[in-house]
Amino acid sequence: MGYIRAEDVLPSEVLTLVQEFIDGQTLYVPKKDAARNTWGSVSGTREYLEHRNAQICIERGEGSSVPILAEKYCLSEKSIQRIIRDSGLSKAM
């Protein structure tokens, strides 16, 4: 992340006010809430995990055991159980 000189972008009145609080220090200005990306939305991680978890639930519903799924997906048995529980599949079984 690069830095932008405040004096190049802020009106002098705003810069003077900011300097009263943090004179000479680095300040991070967060994006507006509407401009923020949700976790994993840019990298595709969220979509990947949703697909993987759905596949785990499908395979569990077809009879695969928790230990086999844990080994196949390189997850702990507790993680597989949590994925199944959170999907609501465990209530159907």
Image (cartoon, helix red, strand yellow):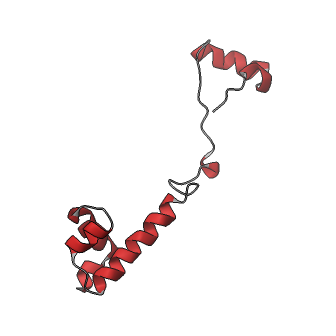
Which residue is depicted at the point 31% across and 69% down? 72
Residue at image position (78%, 27%) is: 9
Residue 8 in picture, x, y percent from top left: 79, 22
Task: Tell which of 53 and 39 is nearer to you.
Answer: 53
Given residues 32 and 72, the one toward you in this image is: 72
Examine the image and state in which quarter residue 65 appears. Answer: bottom left
Q: Position of residue 1 (x, y in %)?
A: 63, 33
Residue at x 51%, y 55% (from the top left corner): 40
The relative height of residue 61 versus residue 36 in the rendered view (above or below) is below
The residue under the point 30% across, 62% down is 74
Q: Please state the total of marks drawn on the protein image.
A: 0
Give left or right: position of 6 versus 56. right
Q: Quadrant of residue 43?
A: bottom right
If the image is split into quadrants, where does the C terminus sit?
bottom left
Q: Nearer the viewer, residue 92 or 54?
A: 54
The answer to whether residue 55 is above or below residue 25 is below
Q: Position of residue 63 (x, y in %)?
A: 25, 86
